[in-house]
């Protein structure tokens, strides 16, 4: 996620701030007051923009995070195209690299806001659970489309996209616990032959 929300309007800044705080502190520890302070917005504006309260704000932050992750796929592909022909393993390595670079530069204090919301709320809040499911679908779809463009059969592309995101999310969790990027580099190395093999002729 980008580190600044200064170019966004007040509503967008609050959604961004909620996503940022959720990925760092979790849903329960992210209060409306903290979101307003982080966004540099008057506390009264929260009620104006989010009449549904914290539940609405969390849902929109999760939705934003899913769209952000999905939009990043096109950026990764563009970067890969500048240096050669994109491959499934190259795409996955790029997806993981943004996390290894973040962790190595700033520590292991943050995770995926969608995963955080899922872990804390899936069993107790149907609205947040649905928002998280939509966010993962929003992320999975462009990954699957990219794999299809690389020659992976459409019948398998969605499954492999799910595998890639699942492996990444699990590796993020382990990296935070271990305070080490070992799990992230491991999933890239181990999945590379499987991913590229799926795009091989025949």
Image (cartoon, rainbow, N blue to C red):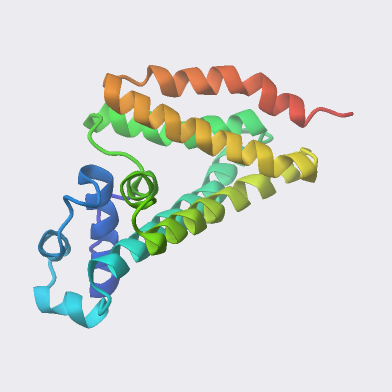
| Depth check, front residue: 53 or 196 | 53
Confirm whether residue 9 shows in the render: no
- Identify the residue shown where x is 10% and y is 64%: 33
- Identify the residue shown where x is 36% and y is 30%: 173
Please tell me in which quadrant of the rendered image residue 9 appears: bottom left
Q: Where in the figure is residue 196, as x and y percent of width and height?
A: 70, 26
Rendered view: 80 above or below 202: below
| Depth check, front residue: 174 or 100 | 174
Confirm whether residue 113 shows in the render: yes
Rendered view: 131 above or below 102: below
| Depth check, front residue: 162 or 1 | 162
Please tell me in which quadrant of the rendered image residue 77 appears: top right
Q: Which quarter of the figure is the C terminus placed in? A: top right
Q: Where in the figure is residue 201, as x and y percent of width and height?
A: 86, 29
| Depth check, front residue: 201 or 54 | 54
Please tell me in which quadrant of the rendered image residue 99 appears: top left
Rendered view: 150 above or below 45: above
- Identify the residue shown where x is 80% and y is 40%: 153
Query: Is 43 on the left or on the right of 166, as rendered?
Result: left
Give the farthest residue toward the right. 202
């Amino acid at each position: 996620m980008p580190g600044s929300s200064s170019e966004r309007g007040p509503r967008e800044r609050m959604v961004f701030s909620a996503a940022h705080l959720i990925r760092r502190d979790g849903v329960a520890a992210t209060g409306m007051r903290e979101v307003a302070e982080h966004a540099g917005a008057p506390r009264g504006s929260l009620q104006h923009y989010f009449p549904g309260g914290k539940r609405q704000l969390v849902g929109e932050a999760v939705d934003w995070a899913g769209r952000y992750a999905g939009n990043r796929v096109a950026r990764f592909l563009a970067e890969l195209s500048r240096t050669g022909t994109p491959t499934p393993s190259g795409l996955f390595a790029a997806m993981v690299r943004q996390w290894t670079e973040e962790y190595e530069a700033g520590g292991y204090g943050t995770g995926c806001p969608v995963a955080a919301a899922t872990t804390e709320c899936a069993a107790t809040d149907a609205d947040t659970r649905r928002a998280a499911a939509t966010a993962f679908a929003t992320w999975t779809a462009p990954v699957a489309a990219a794999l299809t463009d690389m020659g992976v059969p459409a019948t398998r592309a969605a499954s492999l996209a799910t595998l890639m995101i699942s492996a990444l999310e699990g590796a993020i969790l382990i990296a935070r616990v271990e305070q080490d990027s070992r799990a992230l580099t491991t999933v890239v190395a181990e999945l590379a032959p499987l991913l590229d093999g799926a795009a091989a002729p025949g």
